Amino acid sequence: MATSRGLHQLTGSAALGALRFVFSLSGATLPGLIGIPGASGVINILWAGGFAALPCLITRRFGSSTIAGVVYGLLALPLPLSGPPGFLPKILIGATTGLMADLVFAVLGARIGDRASAVLAGAAAQTLLGLEIVWFGQLLAIPGIEKLVHLQLSTIGIASTVVGGALSGYLGWLVFRSLRDSPVVRRMRS
């Protein structure tokens, strides 16, 4: 039975990573249109943090958001999401932002509750996502990254990433709250 539960949780985490990818496709064309790598984040700010929090909320297992982030990074690899097409650090970025959400839930979840944990996980994961795109972009001299550096590292850029991530985490909690009694979520948790 424990193996079945683990498989449901693994499958659920991977499915949430794929679902984040599907939602992120709406922002995929933006970097190509305006010439700024990572510009899809302007649109994706509404759900990246929420999708980092959801696996933790649903499965209650450490590592679930990390798995979802890796799946997202693999699926995003050929597209201009979280960096230009073929940008291999997307996989590492997905893993580390997922790990950030997992750590927030592991360290603070029991003390501050689901809603606050989702808000903090969204803010932390999304801020790390923005910073990592800039760091890796500079390290690998991605064309156009200097435009994103000035935006992302400005006071307004950092504040909007933190606030947007927190709002996104809250939206993730709202989605979880509406799904927590569904048969799929109960199956992953039982």
Image (cartoon, helix red, strand yellow):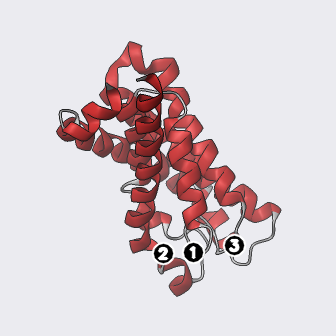
Label 3: few (<14), some (14–19) or many (≥20) C-alpha neighbours in 10 Å: few
In this picture, residue 173 sits left or right of residue 54: left
What residue does disc 3 label?
86
What residue does disc 2 label?
28
Regarding mark 1 in the picture, which secondary structure is present there? loop
Label 1: few (<14), some (14–19) or many (≥20) C-alpha neighbours in 10 Å: some
Residue in view at x 55 percent, y 46 percent: 127
Q: Do the residues labelled 2 and 1 touch (CB within 8 Å)?
A: yes
Residue occupying the far front of the picture: 1
Regarding mark 3 in the picture, which secondary structure is present there? loop
Closer to the chain start, of discs 2 and 1, is 2
Q: Are marks 3 and 2 in contact (CB under 8 Å)?
A: no
On the question of residue 22 being in view, the answer is: yes
Q: Looking at the rendered structure, which numbered label has been put on residue 79? A: 1
Closer to the chain start, of discs 3 and 1, is 1
Q: Which kind of residue does numbered mark 2 sit on?
A: Ala
Residue in view at x 71 percent, y 70 percent: 146
Residue in view at x 73 percent, y 78 percent: 143
Q: Which kind of residue does numbered mark 1 sit on?
A: Leu
Quarter of the image where one finds residue 137: bottom right
Residue 162 image position (x, y, % from top left): 47, 45
Nearer the observer, 19 or 39:
19
Residue 39 sits above or below residue 179 on the image: below
Q: Which kind of residue does numbered mark 3 sit on?
A: Gly
